[in-house]
Image (cartoon, helix red, strand yellow):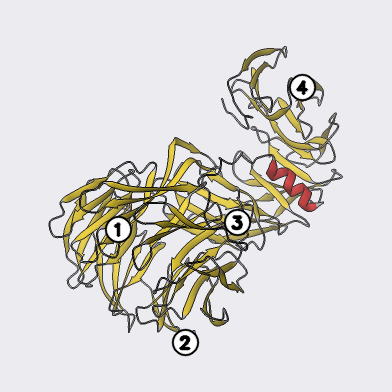
Amino acid sequence: MKKLIAFLIISSCLLSLPGWGQQPKLMLPIGHTSRVHSAAFSPDGKKIVTASRDNTAKIWDAQSGTLLADLKGHTSPVLSAFFSPDGKKVLTTSGNAVKTWDAKTGIVVVTLEGDNSFSSAVFSPDGKKILTVCTDSTVKIWDANNGRVQFTLKGHQGILNSAVYSTDGKKIVTSSNDQQVKLWEAFTGKLIITLKGHHSAVVSAVFSPDGKKIASTSSDSTAKIWDALTGRNTVDLKGHGAPVLAASFSPDGKKLVTSSYDSTSRVWDVQTGTVLTTLKGNGFFVSAAVFSGDGKKILTLSFYNRGKWKSYGIESESNTARIWDARSGLLLANMEGHVWNVVSAVFSPDNKKILTASWDGTAKLWDTETGSLSASMRGHSFLFSRVSYSPDGKKIVTGSFNDEHAKIWDTYSGALLTVLSSHTQELYSVIFSPDSRRVVTTSADSTAKVWDAETGVLLHTLPHKDYVFLAKFSPDGKKVITASGDFTAKTWDIESGELLMDLKKHTASVVSAVFSPDGKKIVTGSFDKTAKIWDAQSGDLLYDLKDHSWLVMSAGFSSDSKMVFSLGGDSTANIWNAETGNLITRLQGKEYRVRSVQFSPGNKDILLVSNTNNVKLLDTGTPGLVKVINGFTKNAYRTEF
């Protein structure tokens, strides 16, 4: 029954998937059961390793697509997987654990455990050490053989965004939201120099192939070239019109390609800072760009859409990787076929293939010359995410139905600010407080949690005895109400975490609970076919709203707190007088079939979204039909005044 309840709640929000793209030439009989986070070749190009949200990594034969090894042992999603420089081991990152595996047998060799979640892990060039970045803003160097910490690099004052070795393994460069780049000795952990000059978060920093230069990219819309010996800023690369997300040197170190939110990649002369060519037509934004091993081609990765942002993510029509001529900037090939965001793309060691990984649950191999699809590694599923903007517009918090972590992002730059890790099962809702200082998450693990939105520190755990479906703040932000499968709604003090009221009159799961705009009342909706109005101060039940013939999926107030709507699982909606509990009107029948209800700002009209391919506007006073908005070719799901 719990899973059915969860399914009903989630399915009421799901959007239809876009059509499938190009058909794969080779299909794997076995695959991951969730989205793929990364895909990488072995050094010899003969194997591929994929990392997935299904808590596993898998090793494949790059030629035939045969599954060679299934790396099971993590208890949370695997964010990344890479081969060691000699190809004998695989390194995986997941939650509070990093593991190395024997690439031939699939047996765990070493497990590195941290007090906080790892955001990335890489081998040193000689494969003897492992470099990790944690969500607590620390970088650690580990012995790859015994798993012992050798050094901890402390010095940044903000979230760490990247940490990489120089090609000779003697130095490490790190970048952070504190606007700084730091250079470290890899063998001692000693800080060599701090590079200052950016005016916003530094998103990435990389060494040139000879280790003599460093390129950094920033949310301030610039990239910079630094002398790795003196720390002097030698060249400023200005020209992008939005945050610069990544940079990559050409194999000879003479050129740099940058990728940006402005939908372009730019190729620069490293010595002069001159723009050599601009790669346009990437669609929404370019998340990565890299040279091929021979320096003749550039691979870009972009999210492409028709210019539409949605509160739940990007409404994508095509998500592509592209191949460009590095000298002329001409587009050579378009690799289209993924049905959702492409999150990684890399050249094979021989430059003949490109490997892409996507949230659509697939990894695909493409021919570099023609852009045609060579093989597809499938078996993954679509996942629906939760998103909430902070009221001040500066941050976004995201969560997923199949993920126990929430993440806070910078709205403008897209930089990850912090990861909220404490839940043990999937998330149902994420929400900011009215002052943007707190985040509340709810989960199938029977808890809601209160977090500091700035630091990501867990402040309080709010316990229930069953799934917690949602949380809503009071208008003043001092209280939060939670709705649960344990038949209750509870109100809590947001600062102390103290339980204030336990609303216990429902006889089935409570799936909706919200304060009135004036803060004086609460309305709850339940699978017991009722909505109930409560006194927000005393917890007394004021009115029992009984009229629905099936589950009540949601309930809410008008902006003046005088009316309440309740939405049934049978697609009917009722409008009630919040002062008396009397039913004002019942909206039912084939002409309505309601999916969502919203009062207009002046409460004069009601906006109904219907599954009959239209939106209806009704007068709250009559209540008569004012207007029908037609023109939808598929079901509408939500709208706003």
Measured Cα–Cα span from mark 4 to mark 2: 67 Å
Where on the picture, by quarter, is residue 424?
Answer: bottom right
SS for tag 1? strand
Say what amino acid the circle numbered 3 marks: His
Where on the picture, by quarter, is residue 256?
Answer: bottom left
Query: In the figure, is residue 329 to the left or right of 461?
Result: left
- Pointers 1 and 3 in contact (CB under 8 A)? no
Say what amino acid the circle numbered 4 marks: Lys
Say what amino acid the circle numbered 1 marks: Ala
Say what amino acid the circle numbered 2 marks: Asn
Find residue 250 and report its horizontal and vertical position in percent: 24, 62
* Label located before the other in sequence (1 or 3): 1
Give the residue drawn at x 27%, y 79%.
Answer: 168
Q: Name, please, the residue furthest toward the bottom.
A: 146
Find residue 510 and report its horizontal and vertical position in percent: 78, 44
SS for tag 4? loop
Vertical comparison of 154 with 491: above or below: below
Counting other residues with Cα less than 10 Å from the Cα at mark 2, is it few (<14), some (14-19), or many (20 or more)? few
Q: Which residue is mark 1?
A: 247
* Label located before the other in sequence (2 or 3): 2
Q: Which residue is mark 3?
A: 380
SS for tag 3? loop
Measured Cα–Cα span from mark 1 to mark 3: 30 Å
Measured Cα–Cα span from mark 2 to mark 3: 33 Å
